[in-house]
Image (tube, grey):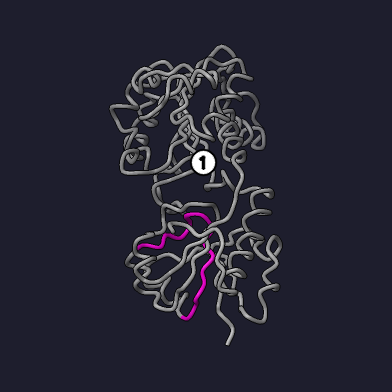
């Protein structure tokens, strides 16, 4: 009998375009789920009998509770070489192998700049106004000569910093373990978190979500920002306290926010951020590019094929 493979959260309906899933036949039978499956019980019902699941980043979490409801599961392939939404200890305990794929560092950094420009210059607001018959309603700052604050100067943050320098911005950087020499090598001035928030005209977040970074920017931190400054988050939603951010936006204690990530995804239809002033919202598309998918899906197929041969590759948490 063929092994059943579930490909989850194919929002754009392109999994079969980028991945040669037919190459797994006749050993495997592949089912692609285009919509998100919310809820533990619903997920368990949909995935009953599947031995392999291909997860698109962190769109569908695999917690210990969920893994316990999936007794047939033997392999999870996650796109990317790490997934904070998979309980790796529980996966090992249930005998589930977890494999990853490669990816690209550039797309999320590029989207960060799209959000910076769109938020600072009110691009989406002016687009809507022009389509409605209007003309020139807003004014926003030029970036040259302004200050960019990069929270997290790793692989993505360093790319964002380089673009900031090309825009002739002064670049500040902070993270909990930032090496001052490393920061200076990347053209950034190492500063304290408080100094970065107080001095920056644009604050952009590039950190992994962890116990240390969850809620890193709350009401006290947002209060340190200039009323003319904008906040951009393309990392993970829970790094910013959404209630505190909403209050800052409504009170106009910051000028705006560009958000690609949220505490709950997909963002609920009635979430107040959908109506928040001075915001540009995108649906976690930092990594969603043709080049990324040209890596994600073919390597996911390779992972499944290797596991079927008994020779798993790109195993995580081994």
Query: Is residue 139 among the parts visible in the rendering?
Result: yes
Kindly identify which residue carries mark 1.
281
Vertical placement of residue 68 versus 89, above or below: below
Please tell me which residue is depicted at 56% across the width and 11% down the height of the picture.
Answer: 145
The prevailing secondary structure element of the residues shown in magenta is loop
Question: Where does the C terminus fall, quadrant-wise?
Answer: bottom left
In this view, which residue lies farthest toward the top? 145
Query: Is residue 278 among the parts visible in the rendering?
Result: no
Residue 298: percent from the left, percent from the top?
66, 60
Q: Locate residue 46 relative to residue 248 in the image: left or right.
A: right
Q: Which residues are magenta?
A: 49-63
Asked which quadrant contains residue 30, the reply is bottom right
Please tell me which residue is depicted at 39% across the width and 77% down the height of the picture.
Answer: 71
Residue 169: percent from the left, percent from the top?
56, 16
Vertical placement of residue 229 versus 266, above or below: above
Between 192 and 12, the residue placed more toward the observer is 192
In this view, which residue lies farthest toward the left? 220
Asked which quadrant contains residue 31, the reply is bottom right
Between 142 and 273, the residue placed more toward the observer is 142
Q: Locate residue 318 relative to residue 117 in the image: left or right.
A: left
| 21 inside magenta stretch | no
Between 132 and 231, the residue placed more toward the observer is 231
Query: How many numbered marks does the figure carry?
Result: 1
Instruction: Determine crowd level at label 1: few under 14, some 14-19, many 20+ residues with C-alpha closer than 10 A.
Output: some
Residue 228: percent from the left, percent from the top?
45, 19
Question: Where does the N terminus fall, quadrant-wise?
Answer: bottom right
């Amino acid at each position: 009998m063929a092994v059943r493979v579930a490909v989850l959260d194919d929002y754009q309906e392109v999994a079969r375009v980028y991945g040669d899933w037919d190459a797994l036949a006749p050993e495997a039978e592949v089912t692609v789920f285009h919509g998100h499956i919310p809820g533990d019980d619903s997920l368990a019902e949909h995935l009953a009998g599947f031995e392999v699941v291909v997860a698109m980043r962190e769109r569908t979490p695999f917690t210990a509770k969920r893994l316990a409801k999936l007794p047939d599961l033997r392999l999870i392939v996650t796109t990317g070489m790490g997934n904070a939404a998979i309980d790796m200890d529980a996966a090992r305990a249930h005998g589930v192998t977890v494999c990853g794929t490669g990816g690209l560092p550039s797309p999320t950094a590029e989207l960060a700049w799209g959000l910076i420009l769109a938020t600072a210059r009110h691009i989406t607001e002016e687009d809507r106004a022009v389509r409605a018959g209007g003309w020139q309603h807003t004014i926003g700052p030029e970036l040259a000569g302004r200050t960019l604050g990069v929270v997290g100067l790793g692989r993505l943050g360093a790319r964002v910093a380089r673009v900031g320098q090309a825009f002739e911005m002064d670049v500040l950087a902070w993270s909990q373990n930032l090496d001052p020499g490393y920061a200076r090598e990347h053209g950034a001035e190492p500063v304290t978190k408080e100094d970065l928030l107080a001095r920056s005209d644009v604050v952009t977040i590039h950190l992994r979500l962890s116990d240390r970074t969850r809620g890193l920017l709350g009401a006290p931190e947002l209060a340190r920002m200039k009323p003319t400054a904008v906040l951009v988050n393309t990392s993970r939603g829970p790094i910013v306290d959404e209630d505190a951010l909403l209050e800052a936006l409504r009170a106009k204690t910051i000028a705006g926010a560009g958000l690609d990530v949220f505490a709950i995804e997909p963002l609920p239809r009635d979430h107040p951020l959908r109506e928040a002033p001075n915001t540009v919202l995108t649906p976690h598309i930092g990594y969603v590019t043709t080049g990324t998918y040209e890596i994600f899906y073919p390597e996911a197929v390779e992972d499944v094929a290797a596991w079927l041969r008994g020779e798993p590759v790109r195993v995580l948490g081994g």
